[in-house]
Amino acid sequence: MATLKLEILTPEGVAYSDDVEMVLLPAELGEMGIYPMHVPLMTRINPGEVVVTKDAHKLHLAIGEGFAEVTQTRVSVLADMALEEQHIDEAAAQAAVERAQARIKEAAEKGAQISSEEIAAVQVMLAKSFAQLKVKRRRH
């Protein structure tokens, strides 16, 4: 069976590198399934879940924002975060969700103005935290 070389890189280093049968990415316009011989493209990656299929087994990773380059034989992902289930701290992810929600609630109750930059930062933090919780709680 044909395979793809999947590499996921973060600022900390190589998060994942292996030959895989298929990868499912949370692309900007929705989930994108990539098989060998896929049409070449570049896309923005949204925070979410990456599903890697290798030898009929699936590996789930939480991923942050980034970009992916797809060729017929390779998928290269540059992201600000990529974590396998065993590396996710569920309590820390849940605390991040609660902090973000509290900030939104606080601003709404006080009628305070939140800058568009702060709104974007809170939304990204929520999306990354929800992605981590989804991957971590998948088997529970």
Image (tube, grey):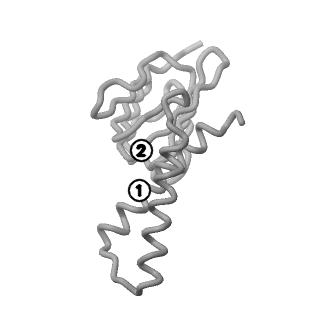
Residue reaching furthest to the right: 140
The image quadrant of residue 9 is top left
Q: Mark 1 points at which residue?
A: 124
Task: Name the quadrant of the C terminus.
Answer: top right
Q: Is 10 located above or below residue 2 in the figure?
A: below
Q: Is 30 located above or below residue 38 in the figure?
A: below
Tell me residue 24's x, y (percent): 55, 36
Is 118 left, or right, of 33 in this rendering? left
Q: Residue at x 45, y 40 (%)?
A: 63
Tell me residue 113's x, y (percent): 33, 82
Name the one closer to the observer, 27 or 36: 27
Q: Is 47 located above or below residue 22 in the figure?
A: below
- Amino acid on which disc 2 is placed: Gly
Q: Which residue is drawn at 44% across and 76% down?
A: 106
Is 118 left, or right, of 58 in this rendering? left
Marks 1 & 2, CB-CB < 8 Å contact = yes
Name the one closer to the observer, 22 or 137: 137
Is 47 left, or right, of 58 in this rendering? left
> Which SS class for mark 2?
loop
Q: Residue at x 29, y 67 (%)?
A: 117
Q: Mark 1 or mark 2: name the one nearer the start of the chain.
A: 2
Tell me residue 30's x, y (percent): 54, 51
Q: Name the residue under label 2.
A: 64
Q: How crowded is mark 2: few (under 14 residues within 10 Å), some or many (20 or more)?
A: many
- Amino acid on which disc 1 is placed: Val
> Which SS class for mark 1?
helix
Spatial CA distance of label 1 from label 2 is 8 Å
